């Protein structure tokens, strides 16, 4: 139940198919619980992580710390068994939850007892706000015109 999905070449196309709306880059590094997670090895990389739930929080934090250094040129895909999700599910607001999946391509001898959850830390995309203000966000003015008595008082004040 606490075992990570075995790393295989079949995991990459499966994950990229689910992430198609995000236009992900092809992962250049496959990581699991036993790989070295140093920051320099994760910089400027697109990674696929297959983690057990006990190491998921540490893996997410290692990925986020590397991603912070260069968010425009790195991304991380995480496949984790859906156990202890409260412990690692909300590590960073930039990590997107993409649902639980039972159709993960696994070796025949691997029988998972729980479905897997997929998370994605996409590359950061700078976006400027719209050039035109959104009219639906603005309230209408309470008075569309100035009452006549206000104009009279302004004229009197100007004459003083």
Image (tube, grey):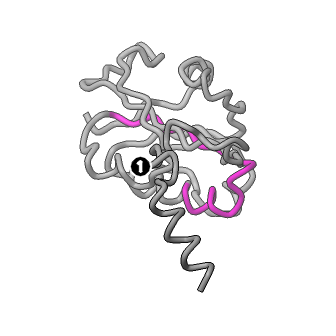
State the residue in front, 151 or 139: 151
Viewer-closest of 23 and 104: 23
> What residue appears at the point 72 percent right and 38 percent down from the top-left corner?
28
How packed is label 1: few (under 14 Cα within 10 Å), some, or many (20 or more)?
Answer: few
Could you tell me which quadrant the N terminus lies in? top left
Residue 32 falls left or right of residue 142: right
Name which quarter of the figure residue 76 lies in: top right
Residue at left offset 71%, top offset 33%: 25
Q: Is residue 157 left or right of residue 41?
A: left
Q: How many numbered marks, from 0 up?
A: 1
| The C terminus: image quadrant | bottom right
Q: Pinpoint residue 56: horizontal percent, then vertical percent.
A: 39, 49
Q: Is residue 69 magenta?
A: yes
In the image, residue 70 lies at what x, y percent?
A: 71, 58
Q: Position of residue 101 (x, y in %)?
A: 38, 21
Comparing 19 with 160, the one in front is 160
**In which image quadrant can residue 77 be found?**
top right
- Image: 63 above or below 80: below
Q: Does the magenta portion include 88?
A: no
Residue indicated by mark 1: 142
- Residues shaded magenta: 64-81
Residue at screen point 58% across, 71% down: 155
Looking at the image, residue 154 lies above or below residue 58 = below
Residue shown at 58% from the left, 37% from the top: 48
Q: Is residue 36 left or right of residue 114?
A: right
Indicate whether 23 appears above or below 133: above
Q: Residue furthest bottom?
A: 160
Label 1: element kind: loop
């Amino acid at each position: 139940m606490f075992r990570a999905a075995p790393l295989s070449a079949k995991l990459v196309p499966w994950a990229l198919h689910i992430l198609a709306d995000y236009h992900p880059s092809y992962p250049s590094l496959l990581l699991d619980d036993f790989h070295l997670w140093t920051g320099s090895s994760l910089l400027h990389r697109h990674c696929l992580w297959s983690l057990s739930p006990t190491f998921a929080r540490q893996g997410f934090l290692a990925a986020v710390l590397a991603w912070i250094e260069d968010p425009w040129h790195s991304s991380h895909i995480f496949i984790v068994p859906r156990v202890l999700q409260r412990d690692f599910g909300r590590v960073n607001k930039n990590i997107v939850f993409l649902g639980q999946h039972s159709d993960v391509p696994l070796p025949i001898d691997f029988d998972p007892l729980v479905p897997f959850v997929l998370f994605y830390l996409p590359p950061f995309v700078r976006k400027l706000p719209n050039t035109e203000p959104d009219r639906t966000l603005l309230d209408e003015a309470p008075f569309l015109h100035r009452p006549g008595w206000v104009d009279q008082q302004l004229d009197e004040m100007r004459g003083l």
